[in-house]
Amino acid sequence: MAWSSCRKTSSNNCSNKPPHAAPSGHFADVGLEGDDAAHDIRELRDLLDAFNTAKRTAWLTVIKIITTGFVLALIAGALLKIKIIWRSVMVESLIDDIIRREGGFVNHPADRGGPTKYGITAKTLGNWRQLGWLATSDEVATLTESEAREIYRHRYILAPGF
C-alpha cells in the first residue's frame, strides 16, 4: 500500500504520513528543519558512527593492553624460571668440578687443613654438623658426596647470596 494514498485513521481523517513519521514540529524543535535537515541528519549519523567506532576501538585497546600485560607476565615468569634453572645448572656444574678436583679422603701430614674429603676440611665439617669441635678423621672419611654437595651449596652459594 502506498503511503501517498489516503488511509483511514481512528478519527476517520485521511492521513498521507507513514506511521513512523514524526509529528510536524518535532524536527524543528531540535533544529532540523528546512533544506539542511537531511544534511544535518547525515552528519548526526556520521557522528554517531564515529562515536561507536571510537567506543569499539577503546574496548579493543583495553583488551590488547590486558592481553599484552598477561603475555609480558608469562614471559617474565619464564625468563625468571630459566634464570633459576640456569643458575642451578651452573652451581651444580661448579660443585661437580670441585668434587672431581678435590677427590676422596686425604689425610696428608703436610696438609695444614688436616683430613679432607671432597675438599671439605675437618673444621668445615665440624661447623656444618654443629659439633662444637673439629670433626674427627673418621667423621671426615665417612662424609658422603651428597652431604659435601649440601655443604658447598649452603655455605658457599646460598649463605653468601650468590
Image (cartoon, rainbow, N blue to C red):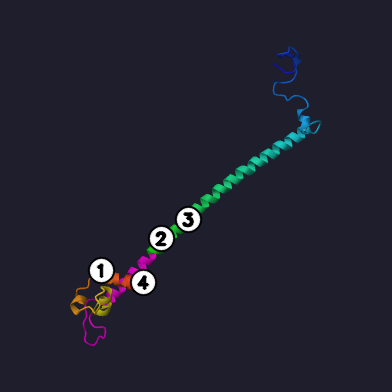
Residue 152 colored in magenta in the image: no
Residue tagged 1:
146
What amino acid type is highlighted by mark number 2?
Answer: Lys
73 lies above or below 35: below
Q: What element carries label 2?
A: helix
Q: In x, y percent, where is residue 119?
A: 27, 77
Q: Which mark is residue 73?
A: 3
Residue 110 colored in magenta in the image: yes
Question: Is the Cβ of the residue at disc 1 closer than 8 Å to that at disc 2?
Answer: no
Mark 2 and mark 3 lie on one chain; the one further toward the N terminus is 3
88 lies above or below 8: below
Question: Is the Cβ of the residue at disc 1 closer than 8 Å to that at disc 3?
Answer: no
Foreground: disc 2 or disc 4? 4
Is 40 in front, or is 29? 29
Estimate how packed mark 1 is, as few (under 14), some (14 to 19) or many (20 or more) residues with alpha carbons within 10 Å. Answer: few
Q: Which corner quadrant holds the N terminus? A: top right
Residue tagged 4:
159
Q: Give the range drawn in magenta.
A: 86-115
Q: Which residue is drawn at 76% across and 35% down?
A: 40
